[in-house]
Each structure stands twice: as structure tokens, then as C-alpha cells.
Image (tube, rainbow, N blue to C red):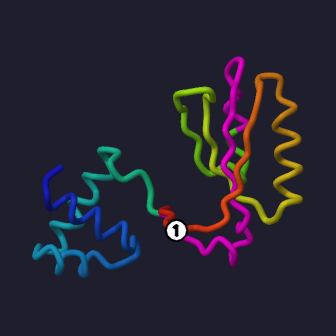
Amino acid sequence: MDKTDQMIIEELRKDSRQPVRDIARKAKLRPSTVHLRMKKLFKAGVIKRYTVKLDNKKAGEGFIVFILVSTSRHIPDSFFRSRNIREVFGITGEFDLIMKCKFRDIEEFNNFVLDFRNYPQINKTLTMVGTLTLKEEV
């Protein structure tokens, strides 16, 4: 990746729906050149998908929770397909995973966490409710 690719990616981060022609104008390149570079970035796996950034509250996902998880063994991949689980990272320290989850309300969260704690692989969890979103990317 060179500086031009990085600039194209930055523009896509701002608005992935903006026309290639607008990105080309900002990069001072021909639209066909920008289009080819975007295709190469996608094929190389640098760009994985184009997505949308929602307003959490308006989308019914205003209750955001981070869950620290200590496990005794592998959690089935099928579990992570839950629509509530948005991000999962392996971490160092006392816990093994941190999950970012979004819920409609506290009741939906409560049902989720009670079911999750029933998995035999789960040793311990620590939940933290987000009270204010200062920055969140797609």
C-alpha cells in the first residue's frame, strides 16, 4: 500500500458511499485509476466489506455492554454469530476475551448474559455498561 491507497481508504472510511469520481477528484487521479486501486485493495483483503454506520439509539441498539470473559476451553464459533455480539478480541491478563455487545434494552442484555453464563466453557464474566459514546467506528 502506498500513500494513494491510504488516502483512498481514508476517504472510504469517511463515507464508503461517496462516488469514485469524488474520491478521484480529491486524490487528483482519474476515476478509472481509483476504481482499479479499490478493486485491488478488495482482492488483497485490505478492504473486507463496505458497511454502514448506524445511530445506535435510533437503530434500537442503544444499550452497549463490554463483557470480559474467562474461559476454560474453546467457545463454539456458532455462539459468536449472535446478532448482539459485535466485536470479540482475545486479550492478555486475568480474562481471555473482551466482547462488545449491543442490545435494545437491559432486559435483552439480561437474557443474553444469563444464557451466556450457562455455557460450560465460561468460568467467569465481568460486564461493563457503556454510559456515553465518545468515539465509535464501524
Residue plotted at (36% across, 53% down): 47
In the shown orientation, is residue 5 left or right of residue 46? left
- Image position, residue 124 (x, y; %): 76, 29
In the shown orientation, is residue 137 left or right of residue 118? left
- Image position, residue 109 (x, y; %): 82, 54
As drawn, 45 above or below 31 = above
Is residue 77 found inside the magenta-colored segment of the image? yes
Is residue 107 found inside the magenta-colored segment of the image? no
Residue plotted at (10% across, 76% down): 28
The stretch of residues the image draws in magenta is 51-79
Residue plotted at (67% across, 65% down): 131
As drawn, 27 above or below 97 = below
Identify the image quadrant of residue 98. top right
As drawn, 80 above or below 56 = above
In the shown orientation, is residue 92 left or right of residue 3? right
As drawn, 103 above or below 72 = below
Q: Which amino acid does the dot numbered 1 rest on?
A: Leu
Please name the residue that numbered disc 1 is placed on.
134
In the shown orientation, is residue 37 left or right of residue 49? left
Q: Secondary structure at mark 1?
A: loop
Q: Residue furthest top?
A: 73
> Label 1: how many residues lie within 10 Å, few (<14), some (14-19) or many (20+)?
few
- Image position, residue 87 (x, y; %): 58, 47
Residue plotted at (41% across, 51% down): 48
Identify the image quadrant of residue 67. top right
